[in-house]
Image (cartoon, grey):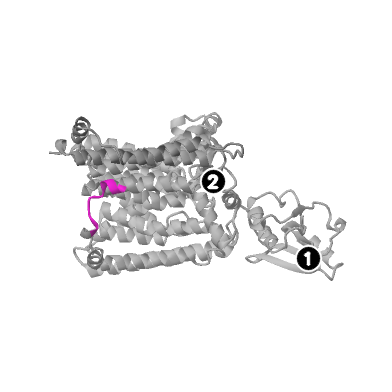
Amino acid sequence: MRKSDPDYANRIIHGILAVLSIVLVLLGLILLYASPINWEIVMPLPLWISVAGVILFVVSNFIRPGPKISGWFGSFSVSRATSWIVAAVIFSVLATVTMVAFGKDFRSNYIPVITFWLMAGICYITALWKNSLSKIHLWEWMKNHRIELFLLGIVTLAGIATRFYKLGEVPRVINGDEGRMGLTALFTESSGMANPFALWENFGALYLQAIYFAFRIFGTTTFAIRLMPAIGGCLAIPAIYVFARQIAGKRVAFISSALLAFSHTHMHFSRTAAVGYIQATWLVPLELYFLYSGIERRSSWRAALGGILLAIHFSVYLTSQIVVALLLVYLLIVFLFFHSWVKAAFRQILAFWGGFAIMILPEVVYICQHPLMFIDRLATDGTFQSGWLAQRMVTTGQSAFSILAERVFHAFLSLIYFPAFDFYGSPIPMLSLVSAALFIIGLALVLFRRQTPGSLLLNGYFWVFTFAVGIFAIPPSADSYRMLMALPAALVLAAIGLDRILELLGVGWSASRKAYTAVTTVLLASLFVFNLWTYYDDFAGRCLYGDDLAGRFASYLGSYAHTVEKGVNIYLLSNDYYFYGSHASTDFLGQGRTIINFPDPVSQLSLVPGESVVASPDRIAELQSWALSRPQGKLRHVFDCETQIMLVLQNP
């Protein structure tokens, strides 16, 4: 028996002491690293903590507990899973302590924090991983699913091509919000954003640091600032596939992934950094997939991974907050109506929230220290906090319920009716005519047929985000890009609608696979062509992106400034509409070049060699006329599609 086994008791005791000593060593070094340098101190106080840990580690090797202590420890059985979970908690606490300690001294290198944090997640997954590597037959699995993987690969490659094609050139300009995002990312190392759990307008610093990493590799270019959104847009294609496959099967999964890959709206927001909602289109489906598949397969590590992803999501964008609300409501509903299903999966649900709790700890501590950063967007763009609802009630005389109901309906209609203008510029709604029809049919099928845990989750996915946009966010014009959060769910519903329509028409999969494949292929191909035309010709080909004409001009101005040597003055013939400082895109693209607003007549300007003067659209004729008296100057015409947007005169 273990109770009489002194070796077992010794291993337990030595293991506990070893862990304690390592924690003391790390804690002392963390505090030492975060302490200000004092050349007068011989032995800093935090170092004594590490010394104590080293002494404890050495002494523990010589400890031989007596029979009574051995018997007491021998009566406990410490499982492998418990050991790894304890390790995960320790790493999470170390990550939190390190984050707080580094924050007091404004450190710029948080790699130890990230390391501890990721180790916490790895330890937690390891605790719940019950399959040995020898049981994983990856090659055999790939052979069994080769056709499915091939088709998904084709669709994913098509999606990658449409998102990376001329990524730095289409759209031609960046807007002001992209410029602000780029400037904030550029200074992550020298500001509070060095903390990976910090928040800026509800963007996670971890995401901003990923953008900064792209700058380090590709330079401060348009391509680099759009790289993370493009990667997120590509990841969304396999993410929606695995989610839809778990909920509705392979056929619906393939159609869903193709609809997303070919979506003109998703293409666009994969090519702009102005909107963070694109990251939700892959994170949310994966979070829901791992939770639901974990419950269905009674796989705790899958569910745990879903919780870990949700915690990571908090360091990306505010959409994570809505997912927490979605899952709490969903689990309550299935508990009430599918009690036996929930009861059988209690371990997996606990594993999900356990992984979430362990990984969210550093973020929670940061939020407690900076609560206003957590509610930043709600304070500025919130229906209630900004005072918009109260003002609307006074203006219209309507009740709060009536106004909010209209807002929810407006959010819904932004998918199928209202044009996607904000941060886009397309005159077409988020869903094309065919996709919208399939979506409405699929929504009706899932909403009114007998509910299952899977259909409830899909319903919740769509409606929670729709209600969140309608009830809590303003202005209404922003619905067209905020509903990007619900787009994957809407496309899964559209795929369900198409699958059911073909079945009712007698060309379902079970009736005729060839007919089903032919009809689906033709439909998806036509949607692919339509969406490519919509985005690359009807939108990008007409220069519709970039806030307004002043926003587009600001981007061209920054691009030109970047070609000028630093320290050389650039004069802008400005007015009340076109002026330097109106959009952050100029500063981001110009990278510190000196631009001086000059509202006076250009005839009063004296240029020294090397300097240049830029005319905004309203003053091009003025500069053109002045240039006639300076034949030695070099003129440069800049066009925005077919319209001249800028004229530059460079003094030799």
Label 2 crowd (10 A; few <14 / some 14-19 / many >=20): many
One can see residue 133 in this view: yes
- Which residue lies at the image location 53% right of the left edge and 40% below the top edge? 34
Specify the quadrant of the image occupied by residue 149. Answer: bottom left
* Front position in the image: 432 or 158: 158
Cα–Cα gap, marks 1 and 2? 40 Å
- Marks 1 and 2: CB-CB under 8 Å? no
Residue 643 position, x and y percent, is 67, 64
Mark identifier at residue 293? none
Residue 599 position, x and y percent, is 80, 51
One can see residue 466 in this view: no
Is residue 505 rendered to the left or right of residue 603?
Answer: left
Mark identifier at residue 650? 1
Secondary structure of the residue carrying numbered label 1? strand
Looking at numbered disc 1 in the image, what kind of residue is underneath it? Answer: Gln
* Front position in the image: 429 or 616: 616
Residue 333 position, x and y percent, is 27, 36
* Front position in the image: 570 or 85: 85
Classify the position of the N terminus by image quarter: top left
Label 1 crowd (10 A; few <14 / some 14-19 / many >=20): many
Find out whether residue 462 is within the magenta segment.
no
* Front position in the image: 116 or 76: 76
What stretch of residues is rendered in magenta?
125-133
Residue projecting furthest to the front: 62
Classify the position of the C terminus by image quarter: bottom right
